[in-house]
Structure formats: structure tokens, C-alpha cells
Amino acid sequence: MKRAMPATSRMIGAGLLLLGLIAAMRPAVLARSEAGLWEISGRPGAGRARICVANPMILAQIEHRSGNCSRQVLRDAPASAEITYTCPGGGFGTTTIEQITPRSLRIETQGISGDAPFHYVIQARRLGNC
């Protein structure tokens, strides 16, 4: 007689599958980037900022980094990617990320934030662990 899998095991299995799908959606340029302390420069009015990044995919939505946004990879090449995202409340953007070195990225982003347009190019450099 076949024994049914406990509900907890099914939930854990589903969670692991979801994590695998999320990881598979990460573009190559960000898959090679590591979580940690990143220095962001070039953002208008912000000077140099240091942020702790748990998931490098958040760099694709730097204007909306605290938002729970849905993302779609439009182009995925070994050293660059283009990602579009939409956030609850009407914010959205399109970001192009280019790898300069394994620890340095060029990020061009544009969209709408707080009912106003934005467009800028920033440099992101990984400094180490948080």
C-alpha cells in the first residue's frame, strides 16, 4: 500500500520547487553577482550609498528596491540583461544591467516612481559581506 506524503513535506517540496524556479529566472549577469554590501553611485541627489543586498535581482529595481515587484527578463546575455518590472501601486521600470567586472555593474534604469518619471545610470560595486 502506498503511503501518502505528509502535508508538511508537500509544502516544503513546493517551496523548494518555487525557489528553484525563481533562481532559474535570474539572468546570467545577476546569477554571477553575489549578495552582500554594494556601493551605489550616480543616482541623482543620492551621492554614494551602501546597501546590503540579500538577492542581487533587487539591483534590477533599484528605484523600487523596497517594493514587492513582479519582474520579467526581456533579454539575457552572458554579460548583460534587460529586465522590466511592475510594482503594486503603479510604479514600474525597465533596467539594463551590464557586467563590467565580476564585482562591478553598470545599471541603466527608467520608469515611473511616485507618479513621476525617472531615468539614470548608476554604478554598483560589491564591497564585501554585510
Image (spheres, grey):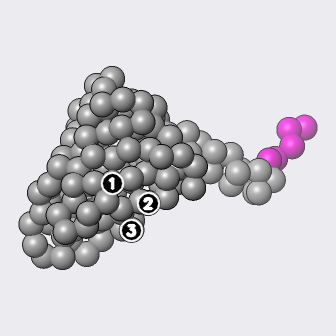
Q: Is residue 59 left or right of residue 52?
A: left
Residue located 26% across and 63% down the image: 47
* Residue 75 picture location, percent across and down: 23, 33
In the rendered view of the protein, which quadrant contains the C terminus?
bottom right
* Residue 99 picture location, percent across and down: 31, 32
**Quick one: which residue is furthest to the right in this view?**
1
Q: Of the residues under marks 3 and 1, which one precedes in the sequence?
A: 1
Q: Name the disc covering residue 40, or none.
A: 1
* Residue 84 picture location, percent across and down: 23, 49
Q: Nearer the viewer, residue 63 or 18?
A: 63
Q: Nearer the viewer, residue 102 or 91?
A: 102
What's the distance in space between the residues labelled 3 and 1, CA to CA? 15 Å
Q: Which residues are magenta?
A: 1-5
Mark 1 residue type? Ile
* Residue 54 picture location, percent across and down: 52, 54
Q: Are marks 3 and 1 in contact (CB under 8 Å)?
A: no
In the rendered view of the protein, which quadrant contains the N terminus?
top right
What's the distance in space between the residues labelled 1 and 2, CA to CA? 8 Å
Q: Is residue 128 visible?
A: yes
Q: Of the residues under marks 1 and 2, which one precedes in the sequence?
A: 1
Q: Is residue 33 left or right of residue 99?
A: right
- Specify few, some or many for label 1: CA neighbours under 10 Å numbering under 14, 14-19, or 20 or more: many
**Quick one: which residue is furthest to the left in this view?**
117
The secondary element bearing badge 3 is classed as: loop
Whether 57 is drawn above or below 27: the answer is below
Q: Is residue 76 visible?
A: no
- Residue labelled with disc 2: 51
Principal secondary structure, stretch drawn in magenta: loop
Q: Of the residues under marks 2 and 3, which one precedes in the sequence?
A: 2
Give the quadrant of residue 88: bottom left
The secondary element bearing badge 1 is classed as: strand
- Residue labelled with disc 3: 66
